[in-house]
Amino acid sequence: MSKVALITGATRGIGKQIAITLAKQGYNIALNYRKENEELSNTKQEIENQNVKCLCVKGDVSNFEECENFVKETINEFGNIDVLVNNAGITKDMLLMRMKKEDFQDVIDVNLVGTFNVTKNVIPYMTKARKGRIINISSVVGVSGNAGQTNYAASKAGIIGFTKSLAKEVASRNILVNAVAPGFIQTDMTDVLKDEVKDEIAKSIPLKRMGNAEDVANVVKFLASDDSSYITGQVINIDGGMLM
Ligand code: NAP
């Protein structure tokens, strides 16, 4: 039976690339999305071009019931979930002095509570199967902090604590839980920055470039594979050397 990977927020950016990379490894893909649009159908098509199945499952990760529903849909279609990638994430940047309470709350609700909501619904199936991989997408700013991102950095630091705690809870069930912490990756999320700012950031990175979605997806592929079967509770930075 083919392995199954559920990836949240996978219509574009890093999530899309993770879905395509795992599809190339032969995984059937459950692709979580919020809005039906052209991007979704293009991504589905790209995945199916790899000769695997792609089930699109609708749901906002910050809504527990919607997560419960799309996890059930995935199980009904495929029977199991071998790999969960908690990728869905947002930013609402502002200095704390001017940040609205709702903008703090929204980012925590999607990035951190969303990771809880999906994982909580997937864990019973992995526990029953006595195997599974959970890969959470954190960020270097969850480790280093970043001015203008108290909400985002707190959510991403929270994901690291969540990852390590859950890894300890479920290791005896052969469920491995790890996080990756990307640096500056070229996606819509970082496209909002001015070109001069991007150039400055690239110059400050030891490898002298922003990362791309493939840089992240390849590490996720490793963490999903048998090659990483003795790794759990870890955070792997994918940042061109930004944090050492
Ligand atoms: P992106 O291009 O903005 O894509 C974000 C994805 O998350 C979209 O598919 C979006 O769906 C989805 N999403 C947002 N809120 C959601 C919700 N409530 N429920 C379900 N899906 C939701 O961002 P990205 O750069 O690929 O980021 C992916 C992950 O990597 C995020 O967790 C981000 O924090 C993390 N990360 C990114 C960078 C970077 O430099 N890009 C660095 C470190 C970490 P819609 O299309 O419906 O909006």
Image: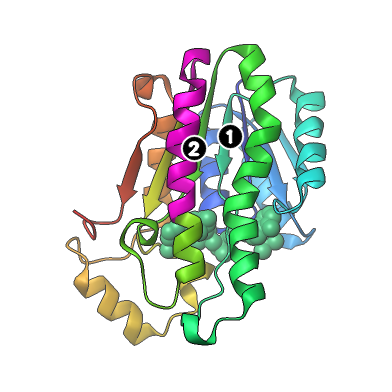
Residue tagged 1? 84
The correct choice, above or below, for 79 with respect to 184 in the image is: above
Q: Three-letter amino acid code at disc 2?
A: Ile
- Helix, strand or loop at label 2? It is strand
Q: Nearer the viewer, residue 114 or 212?
A: 114
Residue drawn 23% across the image and 57% down it: 243
Q: Dot 1: within a 10 Å radius of its alpha carbon, few (fewer than 14), some, or many (20 or more) residues?
A: many
Marks counted in the figure total 2
**Residue 157 in sight:** yes
Residue drawn 77% across the image and 60% down it: 35
The correct choice, above or below, for 18 with respect to 189 in the image is: above
**Residue 48 in sight:** no
Residue drawn 36% across the image and 64% down it: 184
Pointer 1 or 2: first along the chain: 1
Q: What is the magenta segment's predominant secondary structure?
A: helix
Q: Nearer the viewer, residue 173 or 56?
A: 173
Measure how far apart labels 1 and 2 are at the Cα level. Answer: 6 Å
Q: Dot 2: within a 10 Å radius of its alpha carbon, few (fewer than 14), some, or many (20 or more) residues?
A: many
Residues drawn in magenta: 157-175
3 lies left or right of 209: right
In the image, residue 123 lies at what x, y percent?
Answer: 64, 27
Residue tagged 2? 135
Q: Is residue 166 magenta?
A: yes
100 lies left or right of 146: right
On whether ligand 1 comes within 8 Å of the CB at mark 1, the answer is: no
In the image, residue 164 lies at what x, y percent?
Answer: 42, 36
- Helix, strand or loop at label 1? It is strand
In the image, residue 6 lies at what x, y percent?
Answer: 64, 36
Q: Three-letter amino acid code at disc 1?
A: Leu
- Ligand 1 shows up in the quarter that is bottom right
Kindly indicate whether the residue at mark 2 contacts the one at mark 1 (C-beta within 8 angstroms).
yes
Residue drawn 51% across the image and 58% down it: 155
